[in-house]
Image: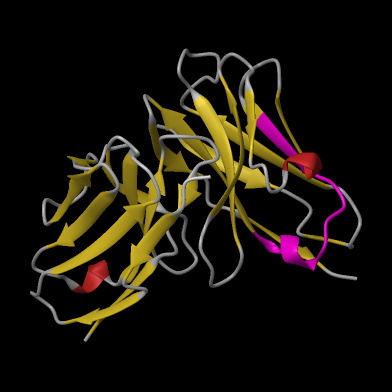
Amino acid sequence: QVTLKESGPGMLQPSKTLSLTCSFSGFSLSTSGMVVSWIRQPSGKSLEWLAAIDWDGDKYYNPSLKSRLTVSKDTSNTQVFLKITSVDIADTATYYCARRRLGVMDAWGQGASVTVSS
Amino acid sequence: DIQMTQSPASLSASLGETVSIECLASEDIYNNLAWYQQKPGKSPQLLIYYASSLQDGVPSRFSGSGSGTQYSLKINSLESEDAATYFCLQDSEYPRTFGGGTKLELK
């Protein structure tokens, strides 16, 4: 069974760095073709794709946020991380990680709510 | 970036009716189009991938079609559990982009 779970600080202050972790099971990121993406969704709004990392360690970023994003994975290929620097209120959202396998984003985590507030 | 224009933004229909939701891509996405259903407080659930392939476990009243830049999701014989927001996703190029969503209300 494939599961993904996001974890984060819940709340942080403007200008700080947001660190998120996606812990997953039921698959390995070392498997050829596997990708884990980060997506966010402000309350009541649509989804915004942020970044991805693939089985080969290649990284992909949304150009609109690229200067603030860093995606990485652990050596055991069971966790993926996302850092967003210099957060502001506009970064308040639910953050999801999702698996992409054989070209299909088929499994999502439950989401981690992040509020940026002073 | 590929822009995904989804319509309508909201939809109200009765049980048993058939509805369609459209997504228009700003360029050819070669059928790399997925549809998701999202209920309040929940993560998106995959319905359709590669424009017309039904994800395992998804009821057959859901179907997808389209090619090039135009895609649609059709829901036949609406049931109460279909009340949700639906999103399209282009999975052709980075950055991936989503449609704005369609909120389906059951009368």
Residue drawn at x 53%, y 51% is: A110
Residue A106, located in which quarter of the rendered image? top left
Q: Is residue A76 above or below residue A87?
A: above
User: Which of B62 and A10 lies nearest the eye of the viewer?
Assistant: B62
Please tell me whether residue A82 belongs to the stretch shown in magenta.
yes
Residue drawn at x 58%, y 53% is: A111
Q: Is residue B41 left or right of residue A6?
A: left
Q: Position of residue B10 (x, y in %)?
A: 34, 77
Q: Is residue A71 above or below residue B102?
A: above
Q: Is residue A6 above or below residue B79?
A: above
Which residue in the rendered view is the most extreme toward the front? B27
Magenta part of the protein: which range? A80-93
Q: Is residue B97 left or right of residue B7?
A: right
Which residue in the rendered view is the most extreme toward the bottom? B107
Q: Position of residue A96 (x, y in %)?
A: 57, 48
Please tell me whether residue A86 belongs to the stretch shown in magenta.
yes
Query: Image quadrant for the C terminus of chain B?
Result: bottom left
Q: Is residue A16 left or right of residue B70?
A: right
Q: Is residue B40 above or below residue A100?
A: below
User: Which of A1 and A17 lies nearest the eye of the viewer?
Assistant: A17
Q: Position of residue B3 (x, y in %)?
A: 46, 52
